[in-house]
Amino acid sequence: MIEVTDEALAKAIQKSQDDGRSIIRVGVTGGGCAGFEYIFKFDEATDSDYIVDYDKIKFAIDPMSKPYIEGSTIAWEQLGLNEQFKIINPKEQSACGCGVSIQFDENKIR
């Protein structure tokens, strides 16, 4: 479903201990100049979520987001003083200049 790099997994576990929750919601929502934006936040799971369990941390993906997120890798990115989680998604077609808004290749969404 999704993969998480070792470094991103360690950061997610560390941040979950700081936050007190062990579920991170990963998904997409409509918006931004390119059409979609990623969701990446601590949250609670729902009965309809697809759960990816990495023991100390779980990732919840809603049914609408699953076709867009499937096959992605979550990585930890450090650029100078900035560091963040990055979703590497082979289904992305383009992103806006700010890198927040993305567009998907609809031929790859199933």
Image: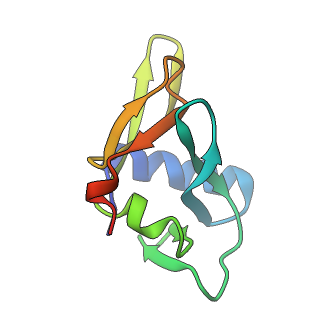
Q: Quadrant of residue 76?
A: top left
- The x and y percentages for residue 63 are 53, 76
**Which residue of the protein is positioned furthest toward the bottom in this rendering?**
47
Q: Seen in the image, is 44 located left or right of residue 14?
A: right
Where, quadrant-wise, is the N terminus in this rendering? bottom left
Left or right: residue 18 versus residue 52 is right
Viewer-closest of 79 and 110? 110
Q: Nearer the viewer, residue 16 or 90?
A: 90
| Quarter of the figure that contains the C terminus | bottom left
Q: Residue furthest top?
A: 80
Residue 83 is situated, as x and y percent measured from the top left of the image, at: 51, 26
- Residue found at x 56% / y 72%: 62
Give the x, y percent position of residue 9.
41, 53
Total of numbered circles in the picture?
Answer: 0
- Applied colour scheme: rainbow
> Residue visible at 49% across and 78% down?
51
Residue 71 visible within the image: yes
- Where on the picture, by quarter, is residue 67? bottom left
Q: Residue at x 47, y 37 (%)?
A: 102
Against 5, residue 81 (above or below) is: above
Q: Nearer the viewer, residue 9 or 63?
A: 63
Q: Residue at x 57, y 43 (%)?
A: 37
Q: With respect to residue 109, does 49 lie above or below?
A: below
| In-image side of 47 versus 102 (left or right) | right
Toward the front, the furthest residue is 107
Residue 105 against residue 32 in the figure, above or below: below
Specify whether residue 86 is in view: no
Locate residue 81, reporting x and y percent: 53, 13
